[in-house]
Structure formats: structure tokens, C-alpha cells
């Protein structure tokens, strides 16, 4: 059963990838829930669970995260992770090898911080992340992740932006 709330999807070369989400107001049982839909064969396949010895090398289920595709990888940021609460984890899934990698950032480069319900988009060689929630507090900040130098930049805007992601 596919998650119906709080999941995010990305498409690459005829395959739709769906990561995370909830079914019937509960997290799915999968530790790393990943579904793939092949548009040519019209078939769904479930990503295999990560072996126990590799669990720390893959993201756990979450909702309200963002997912974007850059080159041959899907990047997910943040989200609400069960009883742990909101996250600032940043992961990449490599489509070719079907492996996960935690994206580390330089210690001096803190980034957007934990949040869920935010939006993200790729433009040229960067991912732009906007808004979201920390607890019940709306975030109205804009961040840029530069894929080339693996760093976050806070983008200051001249105008106040009043809305965040709509569900």
C-alpha cells in the first residue's frame, strides 16, 4: 500500500520514485520506504528494506520533507521523523547504484535547520529551499544549496514572502 500523505516524488528517465509518507495516519512499517513506478511497464516495485547493519546509512521514514532530482540523484531534506520530531537530515539517493548517502556540510555552514512542510526546487546547479514549519512557527526564509561546493547560503530577500507550501 502506497503512502497517501506527506510523501514526495521525483521522476528520472521514465521511473517515478516516491519516498516516505503515511498510510491511514500512521507511518509505514518500512524503515526506508521507497517505491518505484516504471512508466513503460506500468508496474510498481517496492524499494528493498535496508539490511540491519546498513540502517544508519539510509534515512528513516518521514513526512513533510522535500525531494528534488539533480543529475542522477534524488535529494531529500528534513521532514517529520516519527517520535524524533522534525529533522534537518539531508540525504541523497543515487539512482544508478540505488544507494543512499548522508550529505555532510562543513561545520561552519549550518544551513536551514530542522523543518517540515517546506518546498524545494532545483534551478541550474543549486537547490532552493523555502519556508516550512518548526513546531507551529512558520519559517519564511530562503536557502540555496550549491551542488558544486556542497554549501548552504541564506538568501536575503527585499520583500516579505507570506505563504509557504500548500498541501
Image: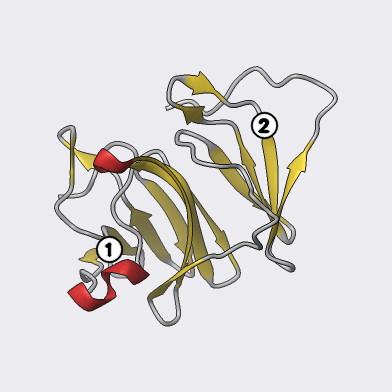
Crowd class of label 1 (few under 14; some 14 to 19; many from 20; radius 10 Å): few
Q: Residue furthest right?
A: 158
Task: Determine the secondary structure under disc 2.
Answer: loop
Q: Which quarter of the image is occupied by the C terminus?
A: top left
Q: Tell me: 101 left or right of 18.
A: right
As displayed, is residue 47 above or below residue 123?
below
Residue in the image at 18% along x and 57% along y: 30
In whole angstroms, how far apart are the C-alphas of marks 1 and 2?
A: 39 Å
Q: Tell me: 121 left or right of 102.
A: right
Q: Position of residue 164 (x, y in %)?
A: 56, 25
Q: Position of residue 74 (x, y in %)?
A: 49, 63
Tell me whether circle 1 and circle 2 mark residues in contact (CB < 8 Å): no
Q: Which of the 4 quarters of the picture holds residue 150?
A: bottom right
Q: Nearer the viewer, residue 163 or 38?
A: 163
Q: How many marks?
A: 2
Residue in the image at 36% along x and 71% along y: 57
Q: Tell me: 141 left or right of 133.
A: right
Residue 141 disc label: 2
Q: Position of residue 27 (x, y in %)?
A: 20, 43
Residue in the image at 44% along x and 20% along y: 136
User: Which residue is tagged 1?
Assistant: 42
Q: Position of residue 110 (x, y in %)?
A: 64, 50
Would residue 51 be visible to someone looking at this image?
Answer: no
Q: Nearer the viewer, residue 6 or 14?
A: 6
Amino acid at each position: 500500500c502506497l503512502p497517501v500523505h506527506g510523501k514526495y516524488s521525483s521522476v528520472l528517465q521514465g521511473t517515478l520514485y516516491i519516498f516516505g509518507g503515511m498510510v491511514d495516519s500512521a507511518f509505514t512499517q518500512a524503515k526506508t520506504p521507497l517505491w518505484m513506478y516504471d512508466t513503460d511497464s506500468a508496474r510498481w516495485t517496492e524499494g528493498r528494506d535496508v539490511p540491519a547493519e546498513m540502517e544508519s546509512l539510509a534515512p528513516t521514514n518521514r513526512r513533510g520533507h522535500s525531494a528534488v532530482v539533480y543529475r542522477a540523484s534524488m535529494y531529500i531534506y528534513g521532514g517529520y521523523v516519527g517520535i524524533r520530531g522534525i529533522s534537518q537530515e539531508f540525504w541523497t539517493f543515487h539512482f544508478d547504484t540505488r544507494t543512499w548517502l548522508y550529505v555532510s556540510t562543513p561545520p561552519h555552514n549550518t544551513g536551514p535547520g530542522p523543518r517540515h512542510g517546506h518546498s524545494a526546487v532545483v534551478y541550474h546547479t543549486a537547490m532552493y529551499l523555502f519556508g516550512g514549519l518548526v513546531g507551529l512557527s512558520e519559517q519564511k526564509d530562503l536557502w540555496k544549496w550549491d551542488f558544486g561546493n556542497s554549501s548552504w547560503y541564506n538568501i536575503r530577500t527585499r520583500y516579505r514572502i507570506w505563504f509557504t507550501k500548500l498541501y
